[in-house]
Amino acid sequence: MKKSLIIASVLIGAVLLGTGYALWNIVGVKGSIVISGIVEADDIHVGSKIGGRVLKVVAREGQTVRAGEVLVLLEPRELEASLAEAQAAMRQAQAKLALLTAGYREEEVEQADAAMKQSQAELSQLVAGPRQQEIDQARADWLAAKAQAENSRKLQRRMEDLSRRDLIAKQDFDDAQAKAEESEQKMKSARERYDLVLAGTRTEEIERARQRLAEAEAKLRQLKRGFRKEEVAQAKSEVEAARARVELIRSQLDETVIKAPVDAVVEVLDLEPGDLVGAGKPMATLLRINSLWVRAYLPEAKLGFVK
């Protein structure tokens, strides 16, 4: 097991006392035997499950660290954005479940009932066709718009003649011309409305009204019935899935903070901010402080000295 000289020098002091005790046990108080040995310790390779870009290197080689002490920080911004998105999705799923569990409010049912009745009335009116009163009103609107358009055209012609003789300002003529064009457009719209009323309701309009009524009736039935059990079960599944995703991203965020798992000495930590580290790849090698020992070699001829 290869260990650096720096680490060996740090650890040697921790084992001198134990080594001296071992030698005393070998030779007792009568003498001593000089033997060679190696200070060894269990090593730990520390990394991250997700990998990423190094944000900060906190520890350094040769440093003694305690369990839980931060060694390296990875860039967390992308995961933080993903966490915010996942939390928003979870809140939305929870709100949907709360709505399904509570059911519809009474005012929602009342509004749906009113909308259905309105659709029924519109369909009935379209099927019955226009009343004579509506026809008369449409004709009166068209005739009034026609008279207004004729008056506006007459005024425009007079203003045009006066403008050619420089008896009025050009702006006055422009205003008269704009009013004449506006009146002409209103007359055309009124005529179209009158023609539609005379022709009666078209089949496609009735079909659209029937479709709107069917949709309004379906919505009212759903509100009165409430939500089905399978809808509630599906909403619960969506909440659990959203919560699981939040927990997953949180665990990934935890992996951006690389900590010492035990009390140890940092043997290898060769990283710089900006470095990319692969998932599961070692970032640092630590030596356990509480697992130090000396591997000594005693000549066979002197085994009898061992007690």
Image: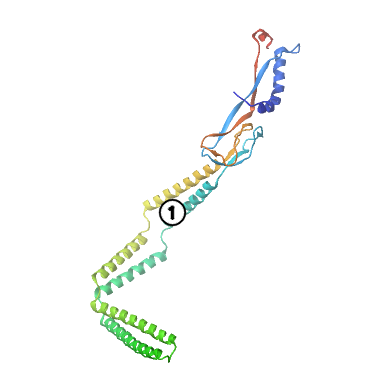
Q: Kindly indicate the quadrant of the structure image that contains residue 97.
A: bottom left
Residue lying furthest right: 30
Residue at image position (67%, 9%) is: 302
Residue at image position (29%, 82%) is: 138
Q: In this view, does 225 lie to the left or right of 130?
A: right
Residue at image position (64%, 28%) is: 290
Q: Is residue 8 left or right of residue 165?
A: right
The x and y percentages for residue 146 are 31, 85
On screen, residue 91 above or below 148: above
How dense is the environment of label 1, judged by Cα within 10 Å: few (below 14), some, or many (20 and up)? many
The x and y percentages for residue 141 are 31, 84
On screen, residue 149 above or below 51: below
SS under mark 1: helix
Q: Name the residue under label 1.
A: 97
Q: Kindly indicate the quadrant of the structure image that contains residue 288.
A: top right
Quarter of the N terminus within the rendering? top right
